[in-house]
Image (cartoon, rainbow, N blue to C red):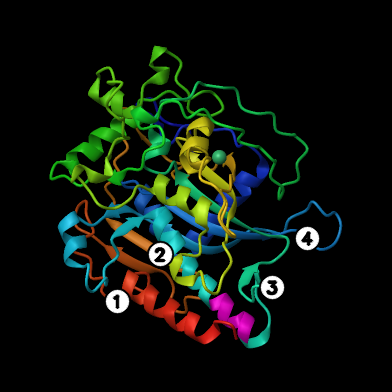
């Protein structure tokens, strides 16, 4: 990384990692991306087009002392992308389900992860071994092995609720022991959150906004997001009376109405007619409630939960706590399902460690989406879109499209149910 010239700035602001483990995870994701998609990140990041990288990773607590040592994180799946299909494309695809509707990085990484889970289930039944699953002796379903942990990394804060900069004061970061080993993460409990601002949309779901003007709005939104203030340690906080203002409200430059819910830039109320794909904040919140394994595999897998969530750009602990889990704190546990609060970690590792012109704005205009799952014999799969949508993708054969995944999950359940 070179120092920015006089008329340049860093593409991403400097941040301080919560702990060494957060950076270990982010580096592992980057390295996997470089290995599976050679040259892609370099090419992307040397253009003005930015993107988001997400990964699901696995760690094991070491079997031998020192007990607290974790093995090196293993990347199970990758997703890259910031686009989704227009409403009419999703509607038209309702019957066949052969398209990838949501190509946001976190969503692709989780879809690819499902492929890994199915491979592991097959392995578990075939020869009794798996990288991270065991058979539960009571339910006979696969479950996460003792000492195995799943982690989600995303290079930028998830879209939707976690991007709304309201309903939280800029509390100081909780203390983190400085002597943590590189493969250990701290326990940072979320506590109970006040949900007194529901009428303003504090706990509301939101959809990715699909308007003809969205393309221009996205640009504007990201400009607005980049104008938010980051503290020295990179935890995004507001330092003025704008503390209670969301990015959205900054853009609108108007006082929020108490009766009108606030939604993050680029998202809208679910029944507004402006979109029909849930925001990533909502999807991740659901994973923290019911697990990552999807409804298709519930008959053969116990819920699989995340231990940590590692975020790069725009990390804000209080807003992430709310968006990723705590807004669902009143949902009662049901059977094996109960709300999990992953440990939230900020990484100092930048996806784009280069420099850009001083007045350049972040433009998430890269139109290529990528997914990769450990075990994919033909490497990463690329989905190419139009300028800002993926409606023209030739992804009818994508292995992460709903039809393909469902068919595979169905075969998997039929083969391994109560076997
Ligand atoms: Zn929480």
Q: For the residues marked 1 and 2, what is the alpha-carbon distance in whole angstroms?
A: 13 Å
x, y percentage for residue 34?
Answer: 48, 60
Let me know if residue 167 appears in the view: yes
Report the Cα–Cα distance between label 3 and label 2: 35 Å
Q: Is label 3 or label 4 in front?
A: 3
Give the class, few, some or many, for how many residues have Cα within 10 Å of label 2's Cα (few <14, many ≥20).
Answer: many
Q: Earlier in the sequence, mark 3 or mark 2?
A: 3
Q: Residue at x 61, y 74 (%)?
A: 141
Element class at badge 2 = strand
Q: Which mark is residue 397?
A: 1
Q: Is mark 1 within 8 Å of ligand 1?
A: no
Q: Of circles 3 and 2, which is in front?
A: 3
Q: Where is mark 2, residue-wise?
A: 371
Q: Residue at x 50, y 32 (%)?
A: 316
Q: Nearer the viewer, residue 18 or 119?
A: 119
Q: What secondary structure is marked by label 4?
A: loop
Q: Main secondary structure of the magenta part?
A: helix
Q: Which residue is mark 4?
A: 62
Of labels 1 and 3, the one closer to you: 3
Q: Earlier in the sequence, mark 4 or mark 1?
A: 4
Query: Mark 1–mark 2 contact, CB under 8 Å?
Result: no
Label 1: element kind: loop
Q: Is mark 4 within 8 Å of ligand 1?
A: no
The answer to if 122 sits in the magenta stretch is: yes
Residue 398's place in the image compared with 181, above or below, is: below
Give the residues drawn in magenta, as a range.
119-125
Whether the residues at callouts 4 and 2 have beta carbons within 8 Å, the answer is no
């Amino acid at each position: 990384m070179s120092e920015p010239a006089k008329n340049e700035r860093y593409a991403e602001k400097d941040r301080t990692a919560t702990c060494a483990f957060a950076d270990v995870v982010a580096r592992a994701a980057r390295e996997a991306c470089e290995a599976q998609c050679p040259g892609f990140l370099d090419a992307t990041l040397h253009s003005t087009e930015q993107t988001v990288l997400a990964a699901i990773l696995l760690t094991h607590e070491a079997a031998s002392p020192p007990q607290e040592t974790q093995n090196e994180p293993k990347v199970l799946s990758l997703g890259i992308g910031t686009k989704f299909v227009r409403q009419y494309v999703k509607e038209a695809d309702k019957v066949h389900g052969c398209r990838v509707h949501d190509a946001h990085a976190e969503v692709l990484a989780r879809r690819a992860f499902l492929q890994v889970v199915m491979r592991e289930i097959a392995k578990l039944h075939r020869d009794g071994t798996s990288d991270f699953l065991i058979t539960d002796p009571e339910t006979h379903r696969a479950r996460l092995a003792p000492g195995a942990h799943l982690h989600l990394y995303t290079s930028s804060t998830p879209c939707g609720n976690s991007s709304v900069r309201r309903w939280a004061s800029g509390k100081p970061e909780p203390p983190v022991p400085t002597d943590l080993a590189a493969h250990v993460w701290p326990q940072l409990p979320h506590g109970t959150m006040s949900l007194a601002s529901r009428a303003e949309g504090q706990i509301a779901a939101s959809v990715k906004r699909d308007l003809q003007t969205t393309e221009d709005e996205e640009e504007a939104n990201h400009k607005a997001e980049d104008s938010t203030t980051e503290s020295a340690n990179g935890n995004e906080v507001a330092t003025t009376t704008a503390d209670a203002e969301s990015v959205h409200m900054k853009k609108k430059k108007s006082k929020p109405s108490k009766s009108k819910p606030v939604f993050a830039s680029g998202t809208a109320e679910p029944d507004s007619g402006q979109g029909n794909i849930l925001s990533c904040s909502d999807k991740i919140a659901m994973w923290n409630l019911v697990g990552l394994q999807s409804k298709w595999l519930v008959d053969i897998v116990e819920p699989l939960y995340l231990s940590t969530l590692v975020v790069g750009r725009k990390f804000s602990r209080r807003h992430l706590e709310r968006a990723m889990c705590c807004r669902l704190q009143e949902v009662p546990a049901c059977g094996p399902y109960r709300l999990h609060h992953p440990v939230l970690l900020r990484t100092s590792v930048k996806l784009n460690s280069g420099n850009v012109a001083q007045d350049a704005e972040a433009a998430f205009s890269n139109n290529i989406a990528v997914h990769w799952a450990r075990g994919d014999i033909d490497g990463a799969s690329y989905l190419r879109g139009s300028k800002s949508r993926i409606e023209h993708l030739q992804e009818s054969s994508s292995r992460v499209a709903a039809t393909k995944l469902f068919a595979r999950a169905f075969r998997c359940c039929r083969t391994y149910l109560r076997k």
